[in-house]
């Protein structure tokens, strides 16, 4: 068994002595890790934007003016129990009137007409938010079946705006899932391309050591004794590159936060700072893994010669 | 110690590097293998190290068929053999000290053993002042002495020196041969390949002469005769 201390020390010494070659590998690994970090931030923007759109979608159930409140509340309770439902808010007929008045406070003819009627012409309504946009249809179907259950033959529901908004909701749903799939695909392609470039760079650095590996074999070094320092060197590329990447994104996200928050809808600087540990953990892990695996694969060819 | 039984090596169907070679090397012998370039000397030593496989025939190191060894066992075998090459084959990224330490690490020696043995062997080959120099900072003769120091550090049973004086001037050649003779006097078997007449004549021990892959002479106390 080769002492781990020797392997680690040897890896560090090789990294230092390989000079320009080591730094070239670090540079390429930094580019790969920067791509990964940029994609993490872009995903955050995409998710934030999609969440915003999702939040704008809801279904409102308008009740008849004379609908008894206990039935409305019973319907609300049964809706809350649905696994697809995220939130149900109830606006009473009185609150609906207050809102209406507030909205039309500068519209004198409407307010005057309302005063003429005396009775409240508006019914209460339930605002339902689903967990996923695709689930609104299930909720609408539930309302169709449950409607009769709750109120018997005389329906208390005046209308459900899902049917009016169905086309928009469906369209939004397909856009969102398409955007998510596309985002994932682009991420995957970019990550794979970066990994291939890094892998080839590390392979090139090990190619320079091809003869040395042969000599080590002739001297009687074990495979692990030869491979170990190269793995450590690969891990060092990953560690140094991830530190550089984190430092690079510091001013970049600060600038994005200062100048692009309106456009992106999310303050990049705040997002970066609050997720610093997770982002660093992801790129550090990716960098080390990439360095080690590339080294192992690259050296395998020469070890078996 | 080493047994070649009807070993033939053919490259690319028609290039015969070794042609039905049968040979025995006993423990403690100093064997010089001579011949022109392309006579098959290097192929012969590559067979012992299992760097190359024969087209037919077998090569034994003691009772072990070297070409039947698994990678792990081959590594163990190579630790019992010290090798010196014409082109030195030093680790360019390591200092003189580290080149020798690496060979010791390979056989699992402790840091203390390395710290005490390496300076000693460097002094032995007169490289005490070059301890922390890299190979590119050394002359040809110094590099070859370093390669010899690396080859002997683990007290191998066999030293293979493949054209060790090929790149050296007469004075360095003389020094290298003297070191190899001294190693042999201490009981280590030495196989030396060369086409340097002066080297062979100064050694005065067994000489195997090769031509076109065949052994054409095997003299107990031979001279360079081609």
Image (cartoon, rainbow, N blue to C red):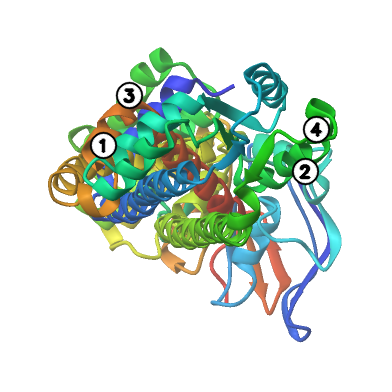
Give the residue at mark 2: A141
* Residue at 79%, 51% in the rendered image: B67
Numbered disc 3: secondary structure = helix
Q: Chain of mark 3?
A: B
- Nearer to us: label 1 or label 4: 4
Horizontal relation, residue B30 to residue A266: left or right? right
Which numbered disc covers residue B120?
3
Q: Nearer the viewer, mark 3 or mark 2?
A: 2
Q: Which circle's residue, 1 or 3, is located before the other in the chain?
A: 3
Q: Residues within 10 Å of mark 4 (few under 14, many from 20)?
A: some
Which of the two discs, 4 and 2, labels the residue nearer the N terminus? Answer: 2
- Residue on which disc 1 sits: B126
Query: Same chain, marks 2 and 1?
Result: no
| 4 and 2 marks on the same chain | yes
Secondary structure, mark 2, is helix
Residue nearest the observer in this picture, A92 or A40: A92
Mark 1, secondary structure of its residue: loop
Mark 3 and mark 2 residues within 8 Å of each other at the beta carbon: no
Q: Chain of mark 1?
A: B
Disc 1 versus disc 3: distance between alpha carbons? 10 Å
């Amino acid at each position: 068994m080769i002492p781990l201390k020797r392997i680690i020390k040897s890896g560090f010494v090789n990294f230092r002595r390989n000079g320009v070659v080591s730094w070239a590998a670090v540079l390429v690994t930094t580019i790969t890790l920067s791509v990964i970090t940029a994609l993490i931030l872009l995903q955050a923007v995409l998710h934030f934007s999609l969440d915003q759109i999702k939040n704008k979608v809801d279904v409102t159930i308008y009740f008849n003016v004379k609908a008894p409140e206990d039935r409305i509340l019973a319907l609300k309770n049964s809706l809350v129990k649905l696994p697809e439902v995220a939130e149900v808010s109830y606006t009473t007929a009185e609150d609906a009137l207050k809102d209406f008045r507030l909205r039309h406070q500068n519209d004198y003819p409407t307010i005057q007409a309302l005063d003429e009627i005396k009775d409240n012409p508006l019914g209460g309504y339930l605002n339902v938010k689903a967990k996923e946009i695709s689930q609104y249809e299930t909720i609408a179907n539930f309302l169709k079946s449950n409607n009769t259950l709750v109120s018997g033959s005389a329906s208390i529901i005046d209308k459900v705006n899902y049917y009016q908004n169905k086309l928009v909701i469906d369209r939004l749903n397909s856009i969102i899932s398409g955007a998510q799939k596309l985002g994932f695909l682009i991420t995957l392609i970019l990550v794979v391309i970066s990994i291939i470039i890094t892998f080839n760079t590390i392979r090139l650095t090990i190619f320079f050591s091809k003869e040395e590996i042969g000599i080590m074999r002739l001297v009687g070094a074990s495979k692990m004794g030869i491979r170990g320092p190269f793995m450590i060197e690969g891990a060092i590329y990953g560690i140094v590159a991830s530190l550089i990447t984190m430092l690079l994104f510091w001013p970049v996200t600060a600038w994005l936060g200062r100048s692009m928050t309106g456009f992106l809808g999310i303050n990049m600087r705040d997002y970066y700072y609050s997720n610093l540990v997770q982002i660093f953990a992801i790129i550090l892990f990716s960098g080390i893994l990439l360095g080690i695996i590339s080294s192992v694969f690259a050296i395998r060819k020469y070890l078996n010669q | 110690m080493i047994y070649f039984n009807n070993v033939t090596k053919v490259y690319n169907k028609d290039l015969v590097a070794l042609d039905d070679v049968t040979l025995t090397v006993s423990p403690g012998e100093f064997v010089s293998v001579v011949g022109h370039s392309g006579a098959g000397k290097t192929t012969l030593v590559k067979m012992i190290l299992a760097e190359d496989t024969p087209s037919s025939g077998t090569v034994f190191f003691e009772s072990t068929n070297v070409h039947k060894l698994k990678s792990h066992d081959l590594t163990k075998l190579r630790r019992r053999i010290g090798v010196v090459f014409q082109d030195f084959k030093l680790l360019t990224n390591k200092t003189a000290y580290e080149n020798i330490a690496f060979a010791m690490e390979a056989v699992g020696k402790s840091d203390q053993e390395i710290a005490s043995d390496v300076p000693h062997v460097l002094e032995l080959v007169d490289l005490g002042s070059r301890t922390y120099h890299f190979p590119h900072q050394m002359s040809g003769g110094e590099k070859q002495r370093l390669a010899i120091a690396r080859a002997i550090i683990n007290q191998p049973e066999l030293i293979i020196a493949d054209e060790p004086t090929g790149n050296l001037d007469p004075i360095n050649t003389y020094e290298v041969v003297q070191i190899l003779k001294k190693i042999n006097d201490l009981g280590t078997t030495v196989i030396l390949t060369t086409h340097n007449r002066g080297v062979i004549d100064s050694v005065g021990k067994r000489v195997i002469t090769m031509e076109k892959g065949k052994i054409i002479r095997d003299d107990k106390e031979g001279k360079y005769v081609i």
